[in-house]
Amino acid sequence: MATATAGAGLEGVVAGPTTICNVGQGQLVYRGYEIHDLAEHATFEGVAHLLLVGHKPDDEELKAFDAQLKAEREIPDLVIDVIRKSAKLPNAVPMDILRTAVSVLGHVDPECQDNSPEAELRKAVRLTAKIATIIGHMQNVIDGREIISPDPSLTHAGNLLYMMTGEKPTDQFARVIDVSLILYAEHDYNASTFTSRVIAATLSDMHGAVTGAIAALKGPLHGGANEAAMEMLQEIATIDNVEPFMQNAFETKRKLMGFGHRVYKNGDHRASILHTLGRQVAEQKGAEAVRWFDLGEKVQHIMETQKNIKPNVDFPCGLTYFVMGIPVPQYTPIFVASRITGWCAHIMEQHQNNRLIRPVADYQGPSDLKW
Ligand SMILES: CC(C)(COP(=O)(O)OP(=O)(O)OC[C@H]1O[C@@H](n2cnc3c(N)ncnc32)[C@H](O)[C@@H]1OP(=O)(O)O)[C@@H](O)C(=O)NCCC(=O)NCCS
């Protein structure tokens, strides 16, 4: 029986337990480890192990986990074919192509229908490894280049950049992407993760739950905000245009992408970490890259001083990926390359202690009509 009606957007509703992540005003914690600590000392591979296996790996465990990820980087020809054909369709954006490719990966995964914890961990590793390759191949197909084989000498982040661009990244650039993947990996019951748990709770399979989660992440109110934030900055274009643009946005009640958060009221713990790294990249890249950061900082200053609304992680992410030369439509797919670990951890947690997720609606229509 229903007891209370939740507020719009389920704001403030505690929807269930988890031991994976705590999104708090004071700190963001993955399985006990605080995000600044992870961003400074961990690698994405180590964080993926932490989330999926459940504990910080020792050196041997990390080596073995890294080897598993590297061994699973290749994707089947069928999926490459789907990428090639989808990329020719005028309405298919990279997030859609990635969603379809992940769904097809399920068709060829020998354990697709097996929801046991052992099979799900293996599938999670395969998905984590292969999604980066899908993104790399997709970018080459879009650019009309030959696809590039994964390079086992590179880290997960370094290889992702290499496969997208064909150029081996500097250690600094690979590390910036690595940190962005750490920051994006997990965030409790956000919209896409909750989607994945709802699907998993019907006892559906991991690939299906991840496919649904990708669709949820695409929207500009969620993961799509990193692309939308950069598109907004491109629309502003010049520092002189920031003030008139903002004035107009306030007057027309336009939402500024990459700002605000449902949970964080005093700012997003991840934003300043990425902003600092992104600005360092911009300073290395030169005056034009620094100009984009100056422009972004002016937008941020006006938002904070006039509206008291702070940037979320997607704002510095958009700027950082932009000054690194990554094509804008790949920003949210790169978010997927990271959040796949959080999603899979939640799908496994849901399956290990499952109950169907099925709330009730507050019906507000008539009941006395005759057909
Ligand atoms: C993230 C987000 C969806 C949270 O939404 P929410 O919790 O439902 O908050 P609301 O949209 O109800 O916003 C509350 C108030 O702050 C304002 N606000 C919140 N985010 C804003 C933004 N990005 N730009 C302008 N105003 C914003 C709203 O207009 C509203 O003001 P009002 O009370 O005067 O009407 C929202 O902040 C947003 O749309 N941000 C832009 C998209 C984005 O960056 N998403 C990534 C999130 S990590």
Image (tube, rainbow, N blue to C red):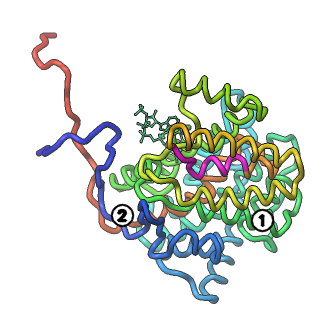
Q: Position of residue 5 (x, y in %)?
A: 20, 40
Q: Position of residue 140 (x, y in %)?
A: 82, 47
Residue type, label 2: His
**Residue 282 in view here:** yes
The residue wearing badge 1 is: 174
Q: Is residue 243 above or below residue 293?
A: above
Judge left or right: residue 331 versus residue 19: right
Residue at x-position 81% and y-position 74%: 153
Q: Position of residue 355 (x, y in %)?
A: 26, 58
Q: Nearer the viewer, residue 339 or 30?
A: 30
Q: Nearer the viewer, mark 1 or mark 2?
A: 1
Q: Residues within 10 Å of mark 2 (few under 14, many from 20)?
A: many
Residue 123's mark?
Answer: none
Q: Residues within 10 Å of mark 1 (few under 14, many from 20)?
A: many
Judge left or right: residue 266 versus residue 105: left
Mark 1 or mark 2: whose residue is earlier in sequence: 1
The residue wearing badge 2 is: 351
Q: Does 46 appear in magenta? A: no
Magenta extent: 309-319
Q: Give the secondary structure at mark 1.
A: helix
Q: Nearer the viewer, residue 220 or 40?
A: 40
Q: Is residue 144 above or below residue 168?
A: above
Q: Give the secondary structure at mark 2.
A: helix
